[in-house]
Amino acid sequence: MRAFGFLVAVALAVGLGAPAHADAKVEPKPKDARLVLEAGRHSPGKQSPPTQGGNIKTTDPKPADAYCQLDAGNEVQCYPETFEQPADEDEAELTEGDVVRAVRELGLPSLTVQIQPGEETLVNIETIFYTNPQPFERSITLLGFDVDVVASPVRYTWVHDDGTVSTSSKPGRPYPAMDVTHRYRKPADDVNPRVDVTYRVRYRVDGGAWQTIGQTLQASGPSAELDVREAAPVLTRP
């Protein structure tokens, strides 16, 4: 009996220490997963934005007020907390000079001088000059901007081709008006007068306020052909 009781006691002790089910498995408690990276490169001064999101911990010391992230090469990069995206240096900016160059490439109207009495005139008589202004309005795309351009004549320079010039604010008119005239003092063949027009240019960008270009632009007109004759007195009977 004593031996039986000893065996029962041993069996109970073993049973209490055994698992409740024969097929039960005891899994060890997993440790907390934690990513610890050794910095391959430490660049606190780099100002490029990170290529991968998510903050990480690093065993490499980092500057104060900075955060670190993995770059495309799986290297640790640290950035100041006050990081700002640098301005785009390639962003287009339209200037007045760009508009001036565009207007010159377009070409302002060159006006043809009109002469009366015609292809021939006489010495010491009032020869009439005039021209017909043309409106200039263009809408162009310049550096990605929609630009409206308007040019208006402000001065006419009359080149007589006898060594003299005159200016006026008006384009002149045909006879009987005599707004712009010139007297040739001596006879000449193949005189080539012309008129050069000075324009004031205004423009606006993307439908904004109109702006006036600080400089004027000039367009030279084509030359005309004129002969200057000397009239000879002729006696006639009344």
Image (spheres, rainbow, N blue to C red):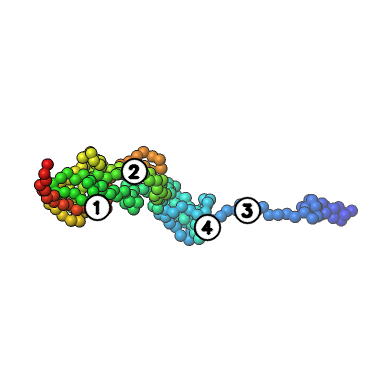
Identify residue for label 1: 224
Looking at this view, name the residue that lies furthest to the right: 1
Instruction: State the residue in front, 76 or 118.
Output: 118
Which of disc 2 and disc 3 is earlier in sequence? Answer: 3
Identify residue for label 4: 37
Q: Tell whether label 2 touches label 1 (CB within 8 Å).
A: no
Q: CA distance from mark 3 to mark 2?
A: 84 Å
Place residue 36 in its image quadrant: bottom right
Of marks 3 and 1, the one in the foreground = 1
Of marks 3 and 2, the one in the foreground = 2
Q: Crowdedness of circle 1 by 10 Å Cα count: few (<14), some, many (20+)?
A: some
Which residue shows up at 75% across the image and 55% down it? 25
Identify residue for label 2: 135
Identify residue for label 3: 31
Which residue shows up at 21% across the image and 40% down it? 178
Can residue 85 be seen from the camera position used here?
Answer: yes
